[in-house]
């Protein structure tokens, strides 16, 4: 009985990771940035023959506050265009640094020079290089297909800092067939 209880507690305590789909990066672009607040350069480059990686360089020109926000909107490719889907959330920029989904923690700690932590330093050039997202860190059950994740960074007074778009394709490893 004690072993069964310990096993059950272990199963409940362990975080489950999704392994049903792969994330393939297509491109990463800067839609807008305010040059008085930040300088941003983004791109997707070949990590190897089959895998793309993200490279981002940015420098803040003004201090961020704990009330500045990051608004994320997911657009799914449907009928020959990206359409706003259910994936929408917003966090303070401070909280984005600690987010568990989308492999953001590994990007900010292991692939950013210097490592990104709060408060983000003004006047320092941050370089995010060679990041290939770990698919198991993405939320389970996301619909297969092409996605555009729009990340809009906004000051507390609603001034737009920057908008960057990340284009990915979610490919399920096992295809379901219609009868």
Image: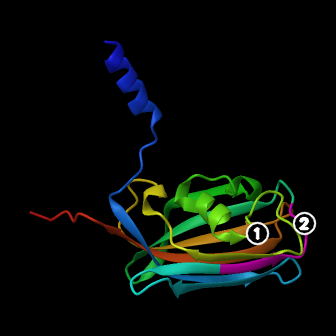
Element under disc 1: loop
The local secondary structure at tag 2 comes to loop
Q: Indicate which disc, 1 or 2, sits on the residue closer to the N terminus.
A: 2
Along the horizontal axis of the image, is 118 left or right of 61?
Answer: left
Rendering quarter of residue 56: bottom right
**33 lies left or right of 141:** right
Residue on which the image places disc 2:
63
Residue 175, disc: none
The residue indicated by pointer 1 is 114
* Furthest-top residue in this view: 1
Which residue sits at x=83%, y=70%? 159
The image position of residue 109, as x and y in percent, is 66, 61
> Residue drawn 45% across and 84% down?
48
Occupied quadrant, residue 122? bottom right
Work out whether residue 152 or residue 121 is closer to the camera in this orientation and state it. Answer: 121
Q: Which residues are magenta?
A: 56-64
- Judge the density around disc 1: few (<14), some (14-19), many (≥20) Cα neighbours within 10 Å: some
* CA gap, disc 1 and disc 2: 17 Å
- Does the magenta-highlighted stretch encompass residue 63? yes
Mark toward the viewer: 1 or 2: 1
Q: Position of residue 8 (x, y in %)?
A: 37, 25
Q: Image point 13% across, 65% down: which residue?
A: 178
Residue that lies at the very extreme toward the left in this rendered image:
179
């Amino acid at each position: 009985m004690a072993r069964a209880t310990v096993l059950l507690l272990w199963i409940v305590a362990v975080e489950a990771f999704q392994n049903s789909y792969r994330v393939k990066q297509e491109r990463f672009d800067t839609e807008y940035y305010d040059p008085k607040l930040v300088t941003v350069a983004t791109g997707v480059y070949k990590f190897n023959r089959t895998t793309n990686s993200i490279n981002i360089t940015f420098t803040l020109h003004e201090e961020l506050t704990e009330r500045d926000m990051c608004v994320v909107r997911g657009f799914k490719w449907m009928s020959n265009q990206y359409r706003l889907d259910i994936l929408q959330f917003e966090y303070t920029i401070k909280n984005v640094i600690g987010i568990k989904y989308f492999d953001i923690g590994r990007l900010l700690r292991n692939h950013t020079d210097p490592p990104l932590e709060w408060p983000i330093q003004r006047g320092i050039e941050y370089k995010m290089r060679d990041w290939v997202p770990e698919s198991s860190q993405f939320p389970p059950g996301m619909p297969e297909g092409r996605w555009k994740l729009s990340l809009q960074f906004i000051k507390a007074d609603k001034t737009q800092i920057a908008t960057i778009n990340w284009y990915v394709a979610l490919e399920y490893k096992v295809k379901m067939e219609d009868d």
